[in-house]
Amino acid sequence: MNVRDSERLATVLASFGHEVVDSEDVADVYILNTCSVREQAEIKAVGKSRYLARKKLRKGDVLLGIVGCMAENLAENLFKLNPGIDFIVGPRCIGELPELLSNGNINRVALLGEAKADDITESVHNFSRRNVCASVSIMQGCNMKCSYCIVPKTRGRETYRSMEDIVAECEALVKNGTKEITLLGQIVNNYGQNTLANGNGKSPFVQLLERIDSIPGLGRIRYMSPHPKGFRRDLIAAHARLAKLCPSVHLPVQSGSDRILKAMRRPYTRARVLFIVEALRNCAPNISLTTDIIVGYPGEGEVDFQETVDLLSAVRFNMAFIFKYSPRVGTISATLPDDVSDDEKDRRNKVLLDIVQRCSIEHNETMVGNEVEVLVEGKAKRGENKLCGHTKYGDKVIFDGHDTLTGEFANVKITNYSTTVLCGELIGV
Ligand code: SAH
Ligand code: SF4
């Protein structure tokens, strides 16, 4: 979501006559897009903003702005933490940044909270280059109150874009060469809840998926980040029905302990998670599943932790993001004692990472010798003549080839692997 925010910010500023440059040395404005989900993200961003303030002092005549969730979360305190900051803009006001920059005379300006007007940057993409894979934000904000989470404070309540707008944006992307679209939202599968009507037992989100699935020329659809509560029958069945919907789902479970899930205010149980997993696997065999887990939530005992260990071992997620619990001021759980020590959080983190790595290696091992279809995204970061792309299951694949293949679906035979990447040989397109 932050990557998409940065992209639309850069593109909209370019349309106002600004230019994105490669180096801080030649920039007139430094804009730092930030995250607040964990304290570590904020510590890093404040550190980077101090580095930029020092650069600004040496260079003179440069503006420094902080945008995104940390701007909203720390608000005017940021000016005290770093007196070199000239403006702060929360995630809902990103569309007002071009106007702010055209005003000149910017001295500790804060654009926070709700935006003054509709965000004109929402559907903006850089059409001057081809984006094989593009992200489309379909909603903003989150109405849940997970006890640990700062997002509802920084991004506000849920607002949904119109289906017409979203479909038009997807069509424009496809016309420009996009082959894969990822729909984005904090609870993406909550799209349109209580504002758009269900039709034939299908939620607005599933109706939207159907419309995007029928766009000619589009190859794949993904969505991020769904919530387990939104995996009802219609969405699960969509994975069997919709040809372009990738057999790859992120199912952020956070914990395998019902006691901890309740304390976190996550409205589902471990049994429900297992039911969803089985239903998805019945609809889309070999579907790839990933998850988010928090270790060391207040009061998480060894028994609770073992339930998470068991859940990971039982489901065999293809990948999991494991986070050490980080108290965020302003959330419900920040008032509870952070009673799992750092060392113990580290230990639990490592135990879970080991399980995930083992599952990942075992999966990658079974892929050797298989022929897979890869959507070529472009040159790999490392290696001469190496191309990089993903399978519909989300496996990253690297192979030798010419970058004229970018945007094509290539058949690749898997010959080797590491923990996170499959390596292969091009067979054809
Ligand atoms: N809307 C998504 C998650 C958004 S935040 C959902 O509901 O699943 C991304 C991930 O960051 C979360 O899934 C959670 O695992 C992690 N996270 C959020 N707040 C956290 C905190 N205070 N400490 C540690 N991890 C946190
Ligand atoms: Fe945060 Fe996700 Fe919970 Fe919303 S649903 S409060 S974004 S963890």
Image: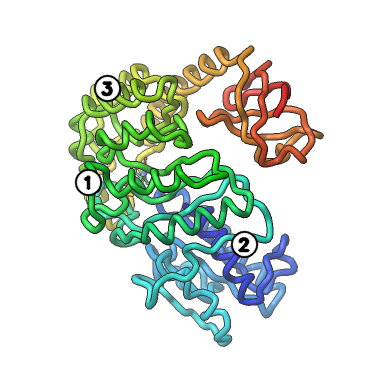
- Say which mark, if any, is on residue 307: 3
Task: Residue at 47% x, 71% y: name it.
Answer: 120
Mark 1 nearby-residue class (10 Å; few <14, some 14–19, many ≥20): few
Q: Which of 325 and 10 is in front in this view?
A: 10
Sequence-earlier tag: 1 or 2: 2
* Residue 284 point in image, percent of width and height: 40, 24
Q: Distance between the residues labelled 1 and 2?
A: 34 Å
Side (left or right) of 49 relative to 290: right
Q: Which of marks 3 and 1 is in front?
A: 3
* Residue 317 point in image, percent of width and height: 41, 24
Mark 2 nearby-residue class (10 Å; few <14, some 14–19, many ≥20): few
Q: Distance between the residues labelled 3 and 1?
A: 22 Å
Q: How far apart are marks 2 and 3 (CA)?
A: 43 Å
Q: Which of 181 and 117 is in front in this view?
A: 181
Indicate whether 112 appears above or below 269: below
- Say which mark, if any, is on residue 51: 2
Q: Which of 105 and 362 is in front in this view?
A: 362
